[in-house]
Image (spheres, helix red, strand yellow):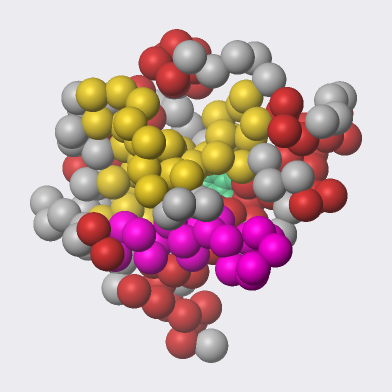
Amino acid sequence: METLAERHSTREFKPRELSDSTLANLLWAANGINRPDGHRTAPSALNRQEIDIYVFTESGVWLYEPISNTLLPRAEGDHRSILCGGQDFVTQAPVTLLLVANGDRFQMSGERATLMMAADAGIVCENINLFCSSAGLSTVPRASMDTEAIKKLLSLPDSQIPMLNNPIGY
Ligand SMILES: Cc1cc2nc3c(=O)[nH]c(=O)nc-3n(C[C@H](O)[C@H](O)[C@H](O)COP(=O)(O)O)c2cc1C
């Protein structure tokens, strides 16, 4: 009840970084593996587990790999500006999590598939919102971003859709 009561969007961030353990807990809460059979903290349509999480910081971009609970490097340097979509506060957040729906893993296409992938992304996003609320972190769910620049940076094919992002900090 307390976590839900505290959940709200924040668009101002202090420079304070997240510790590695806080980031690890955040990613696990967002969409980590919570059962021996590989199921995740976030449900997904048909259990396709198609939502990937990219971590943007001042020093680079990584892909969260839930099986080993590790981060796979995807780009060096500060690319947070392509997530702004006209909202400069995003570059003040030490971490932004980008949720990408992997349509190839979803194995279905068309409007209904896109709707289900959007729902799946929304659930991961709410896991992030609620973890932040419970851990004293600030965040805001966002759809604004430069999707073409993101696809180029991360070499995403058209089947992978940037859905939402969450800037996170204190
Ligand atoms: C799907 C979705 C997209 C959103 N996109 C943005 C956005 O691009 N920029 C932004 O500042 N807030 C965005 N928001 C946050 C909403 O504006 C915010 O949740 C709403 O005003 C309610 O405020 P609350 O989250 O504090 O309850 C988005 C929220 C959702 C659910």
Residue 165 at x, y = what percent?
46, 41
- Give the residue furthest to the left: 15
Above or below, 43 relative to 74? below
Give whichever of 38, 44 is nearer the camera: 38
> Which residue lies at the image location 53% right of the left edge and 59% below the top edge?
32
Query: Which image quarter holds the C terminus?
Result: bottom left
> Which residue lies at the image location 12% right of the left edge and 57% below the top edge?
16
Above or below, 162 relative to 147? below
Q: How many labels does the image show?
A: 0
Q: Is 66 placed left or right of 161 in the picture? A: left
Q: Is 157 placed left or right of 72 in the picture? A: right
Residue 119 visible in image: no
Residue 52 visible in image: yes
Q: Is 127 placed left or right of 14 in the picture? A: right
Residue 6 at x, y = what percent?
42, 77
Give whichever of 12, 157 is nearer the camera: 157
Range covered by the magenta-colored residues? 22-40
> Which residue lies at the image location 72% right of the left edge and 33% below the top edge?
105
Give whichever of 62, 110 is nearer the camera: 62
Confirm whether the magenta stretch covers residue 138: no
| Residue 126 placement: quadrant | bottom right
Residue 73 at x, y = what percent?
33, 31
Q: Is 31 placed left or right of 17 in the picture? A: right
